[in-house]
Amino acid sequence: MELEFEKPLLEIEARIAALKRAATEQPDSPPSPEIADLERQRDEMERAIYANLTPWQTVQVARHPNRPRLDDYLAGVFSEYVELHGDRLFGDDAAITGGFATIDKYKVMVIGHQKGKSVDENIKTRFGMGNPEGYRKALRLMKLAEKYSLPVICFVDTPGAYPGLEAEARGQAEAIARNLTEMARMETPMIVVVTGEGGSGGALGIAVGDEILMLSNAIYSVISPEGCASILWRDGAKAPEAAEALKLTAKSLLELRIIDRIITEPAGGGHRHPSATIAAVKDALIPSIKFLRKRSPRKLLKRRYEKFAAMGRFGRR
């Protein structure tokens, strides 16, 4: 997927690749000094572009298909992952998965939205849009973690909950609402990481946490920019204006105290530098786990209540 604002970068990279191919074909020739110059230009341009993304450009980066998915974080951040299946009521939802895992020396429960990397996988996971059984499975795993005093880590990356008729018939709204209630009073540390799209109630259904972390090029909003533009202006082409108004970037949400911390992605974003992005997430999670594990359940609940009760207040606090 080619982003319009990345075209100058891609042109430089194409020139670098061509020069390297030529050098390979002529191994006796001295290395071209132009390669080093172009690589410097690329790095400088990458930093400049990603330091000044508009909200709409951030939306495009957050949705990029090459960004790390839940499976990538499970492989790069955790070890000893054991997936658990089913909600014990209806079935097993591929769009929301989870299980026991280890990070550093800590045993945790990991839950997250699962997007696919191919057409078939995206059809199976509905692009990360959970059904009611997915949210009920997530709650079942949270309660299991609470029983054993394990921290819960939730990875959020979804356009929203699945809007199909069958999902509504099985109680989509009730499942999400119940999760909000139960997460608010869960007596174990709850950590949320928004890694891509944080869309509406579909995101919030696993996003009530003691600490909410967010990758610097992720988004988190009550509605998509296209949906907002269609409602307000009856024109989806005004999505860039809607993205600006929604304050959906990590920087805006930190200022509004909706999230607690930004995990800085490498210049160029997670889709261009997935390994470094995954490492940054791991580095951010371990201090949060250490901090929250020292808090008693009573202090966790008090702090969590005060955190969410303060959202939406205006003026000085």
Image (spheres, rainbow, N blue to C red):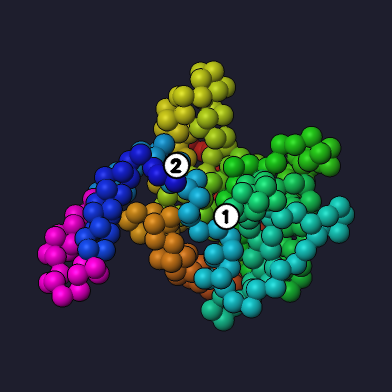
Dot 1, how many residues are within 10 Å of its Cα: few (below 14), some (14-19), or many (20+)?
some
Q: Residue furthest top?
A: 234
Q: Provide the residue designation for mark 1.
A: 117
Dot 2: element = helix
Reply yes or no: does residue 31 show up in magenta. Answer: yes
Residue 82 in the image: x percent, y percent?
A: 70, 73
Give the main secondary structure, helix, strand or loop, of the magenta stretch.
helix
| Residue at 79 percent of width and 57 percent of height | 92
Element on which disc 1 rests: loop
Q: Position of residue 196 (x, y in %)?
A: 51, 50
Residue at the spot 66% in from the left edge and 68% down from the top edge: 109
Q: Is residue 283 magenta?
A: no
Query: Total marks drawn?
Result: 2
Q: Looking at the image, which residue is at 44% across and 62% down?
A: 274
Three-letter residue code for mark 1: Lys
Closer to us: 296 or 238 = 238
Q: Residues within 10 Å of mark 2 (few under 14, many from 20)?
A: some
Residue 60 - label: 2
Q: Which residues are magenta?
A: 23-45
The residue positioned 51% from the left and 32% from the top of the image is 225
**Left or right: 297, with 31 as reference point:** right
- Which quadrant holds residue 269? bottom left
Between disc 1 and disc 2, the foreground one is 1
- Viewer can see residue 34: yes
